[in-house]
Amino acid sequence: MNLSRIVPALVLFLASLWAGCATAPSTPREREDLKESASRALRDMETQDPSLSRFLAESYGYVVFPRVGKGGYFVGGGYGRGIVYRQGTPIGYADITQATVGLQFGGEAYLEVLAFQGAGDLDRFTAGQLSLTANVSAVILKTGAAAAARYTDGVAVFVKPIGGAMVEASVGGQQFTYQPE
């Protein structure tokens, strides 16, 4: 493994995460592309686990992050953009940022869906009062997993790996920003 190539790439990746990313894409075309990506990601997740459709239909709202990139070398971070839905209708945009510290090395990408049990839980998200820490566990999507999923403080998290590899024993959390459509 050639650290002289990997470390600079990770540093550039992490620096790009905090380079002033806006919550909503800046052009109408980019916004439409994000909506299409979120729809494709959701269809892909529902194909893998049909019980996810029922879980989301019973949720008050949800957010689909079609691609979250994450990387680290002792200090790590991640970023992704998504679409926020209230009762199945898009209402705005969200971004996810995360920071971690600890033993970690590598990079990965994944899909993430947050489901909100009730109106107050979605309101907490849109008001910027939600962050996820180590005590919230994500359900790794596989057939039937959503049927057994439970809310923690009104939020359920579903994750589907896309690619990459990361060795990690770190502490951190996820922060979210919301922008109405």
Image (cartoon, rainbow, N blue to C red):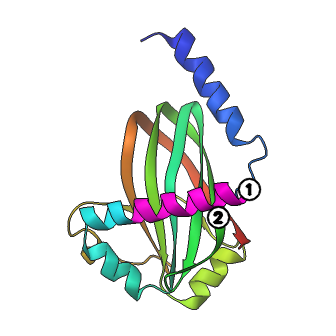
Residue pictured at 59% horizontal, 22% vertical: 9
Residue 149: % across, % down: 32, 74
Q: Is residue 35 magenta?
A: yes
Please state, as top left, top right, bottom left or bottom right, where the N terminus lies in the image: top left
Between 168 and 61, the one lying in front of the other is 61
Residue pictured at 65% horizontal, 80% vertical: 124
- The residue where tag 1 is placed is 27
Residue 120: % across, % down: 60, 88
Q: CA distance from mark 1 to mark 2?
A: 15 Å
State whether residue 57 is above or below residue 169.
Answer: below
Q: Residue furthest front?
A: 29
| Mark 1: few/some/many CA within 10 Å (<14, 14-19, 20+) | few
Tell me if 120 is positioned left or right of 48 in this view. Answer: right
- Amino acid under disc 2: Ala
Tell me if 13 is positioned left or right of 55 in this view. Answer: right
Q: Quadrant of residue 19?
A: top right
